[in-house]
Amino acid sequence: MKLEVKEKEEARKSAQSELEDLLIVFGDLEAKRNEDKKRLKDLGQEVSEAEEDDDDDDEEDEDDEE
């Protein structure tokens, strides 16, 4: 019985570690995506609203440019 509990705890810790790693990767991807969107805007390219759904600050910048 103790062995079963230990195995389940190890599996939980492993899954938790994988989730934390994924969160780090997603955070890095989001930062890169935001940098790329800013670079595109700086180059005069349009970024659709669907691509801006999490960046309220960018909408204010567009208003300033017009």
Image: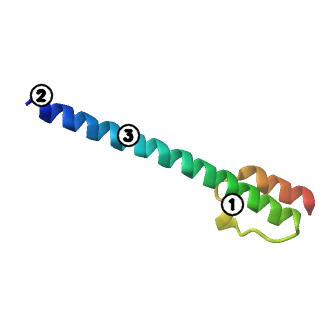
Task: Mark 3 or mark 1: name the one nearer the start of the chain.
Answer: 3
Quarter of the image that includes the N terminus = top left
**Circle 2 or circle 3, nearest the eye:** 2
Between the residue at mark 1 and the residue at mark 2, the CA separation in whole angstroms equals 51 Å
Q: Secondary structure at mark 3?
A: helix
Q: Is residue 19 above or below residue 36?
A: above
Q: Position of residue 30 (x, y in %)?
A: 63, 53
The three-letter amino acid code for the residue at tag 1 is: Glu
Q: Secondary structure at mark 1?
A: helix
Between the residue at mark 2 and the residue at mark 3, the CA separation in whole angstroms equals 21 Å
Q: Position of residue 51 (x, y in %)?
A: 66, 65
1 left or right, relative to 62: left
Q: Which mark is residue 2?
A: 2
The mark total stands at 3
Q: Which mark is residue 16?
A: 3
Quarter of the image that includes the C terminus = bottom right
Q: Residues within 10 Å of mark 1 (few under 14, many from 20)?
A: some
The three-letter amino acid code for the residue at tag 3 is: Gln
Q: Name the residue furthest front.
A: 3
Query: Mark 1 = which residue?
Result: 52
Q: Residues within 10 Å of mark 2 (few under 14, many from 20)?
A: few
The three-letter amino acid code for the residue at tag 2 is: Lys
